[in-house]
Image (cartoon, rainbow, N blue to C red):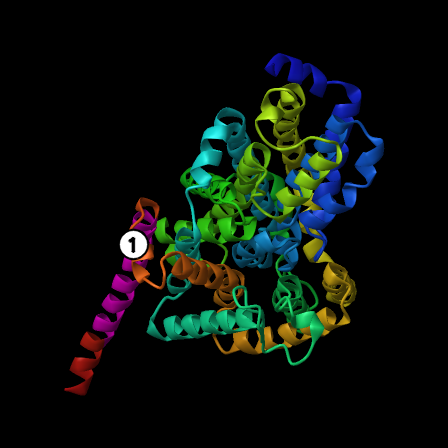
Amino acid sequence: MILESLQALIVPSSLLAVFIGTVSGVLVGGMPGLTATMAVALLIPITFVLEPLTGLILMGGVYCGAMYGGSIPAILLRTPGTPAAVATAMEGYPMSQQGHGGLALKVSVISSFCGGIFSTAVLLAVAPILAIFALTFGPPEYFLLAILGLVGIVSMADDENSLVKALISGLLGLILAVVGTDPISGQLRYTMGLTDLYDGVAFMPALIGMFSISQMLDLTSVKRIVTDTSTLKKIKREPFPKGLKKFICLGSLTGTVVGILPGEGATIAAFLSYNFARQRSKNKKLFGHGNPEGIAAAEAGNNGCVGGSLIPTLTLGIPGNSVAAALMGGLIVHGLIPGPELFTKYGVMTYAFILSLFLANVIFLVIGLSMAPYFARISLIPTEILIPVVCLFSLLGSYAMNNSVLDIFMALLFGFTAIILHRTGFSLGALILGLILGPIAEAGFAQALIIGHGSYSVFFTRPQAIILWIIIFLLLLPPIIQISRQSKDRAAEEEPKAE
């Protein structure tokens, strides 16, 4: 069957569909606000006139390309093209400011390729088995998975003072996540009578405001992003940093596992991978100042989510995330119902689609490596040209998500607020984590208590939950020990002075 699928893939129409889809995905991912979900959803009507396989391959190429493409503006402009690229921006943009934007792009594309290839190989090999595993996760596990992500807030702190500010930032994100409709009772909370807030604070406008608008406002005081332009001439000669393999492997595995869990997205996969890398790194102090280890883990994580999210989608008809849900809509439009029949009756088409994902990863790898020196020169564009163009695309992206004027004002409000928070030492990453994971934690907590009839033992009885508790404890231990040691060292230094 694999050979028949390969023959179906290597026909000119299929190869052209992979190429067009991947290139389009990279372009869409590189535009703030135009997410992979939106791109795949817009493609569904176009696939009506195409053969089912060609349409699927086209959407798959867009999915793969967009997940990588979001890292390009995140690294060069601190403007994430997709929500999953926020973690990449934390390390990629400082590298661009230091004149190493080309190297950051190289790390990004290679890590994305490895994550994508690994997750697609898992999809090809053991999809049905892993889909059954995904069904064992219930509300208690989703709550603990959200807590696992929120633990990353602690790891973002270097001392007691920054820990307090990181926790306050995370709490602020959780408070914002409460706005909207209660997922259990259906009651409205803090909507101020605005119908646009019934679904809560729109994540994408908030993200664009905090990382795009705020950065453009910061750039008004400089002429260029990069002050030392001499380093840009060394882009092609910069060697790939050593020691990144374990972070790429860590991100690939984390992204695939998170992708398999229904409802979890690439943003969570990227942040979890980034936090795991921060915990395991020997260069923790470099995080936040341009550490390629963070880029490697985050990018491998968000692209690892691609193949993982398709496992429950194709085998059980349960979308792994919003992009997979849009892609499943394309399957149903062509009369292909997810389930065992996809791997038996329509096996040739299904396996050809999976094989096309390997090809899509190769295509964006070639594009990324060959175009990195030219992408990096975006950071040389004078700010008087860059600022209005990026702000225009950012505001258009904010509006395009829900066709809401309120989202434009939200983006601007978050942009001005982000500048104040950043300059006073608060953590934007912690705020974003709270905003992303707050709804997941709330829904999982409430549903778990309903299942457990109000008993909290439901969070401690299942093996999956116990494993997650152990991981949470192990991740909390190192930063707490480090901060306590620092406080003891300071106390020891202050004692002689007091005497």
Q: Which residues are magenta?
A: 465-490
Label 1: which secondary element: loop
Total numbered circles: 1
User: Residue 5: x, y in percent?
Assistant: 65, 18
- Examine the rendered structure and indicate whether residue 231 appears above or below residue 147: above
User: Residue 165: x, y in percent?
Assistant: 42, 74
The quadrant of the rendering that contains the N terminus is top right
* Residue found at x 20% / y 84%: 497
User: Residue 91: x, y in percent?
Assistant: 52, 55
Label 1: how many residues lie within 10 Å, few (<14), some (14-19) or many (20+)?
some
Q: Residue furthest right?
A: 49
Q: Give the side of residue 68 with respect to residue 395, left or right.
A: left
Amino acid type shown at disc 1:
Phe
By secondary structure, the bulk of the magenta-drawn segment is best described as helix
* Residue found at x 67% / y 65%: 205
User: Residue 247: x, y in percent?
Assistant: 43, 43
* Residue found at x 62% / y 23%: 351
* Residue found at x 64% / y 44%: 325
Q: Residue furthest bottom?
A: 499
Specify whether residue 99 is in view.
no
Is 181 a magenta residue?
A: no
Q: Give the side of residue 148 with respect to residue 295, left or right.
A: left
Is 471 a magenta residue?
A: yes
Q: Residue furthest left?
A: 499
The quadrant of the rendering that contains the C terminus is bottom left
- Examine the rendered structure and indicate whether residue 497 appears above or below residue 198: below
Residue toward you, 126 or 161: 126
Residue toward you, 27 or 18: 18
Give the residue number, with chain letter if any, for mark 1. 460
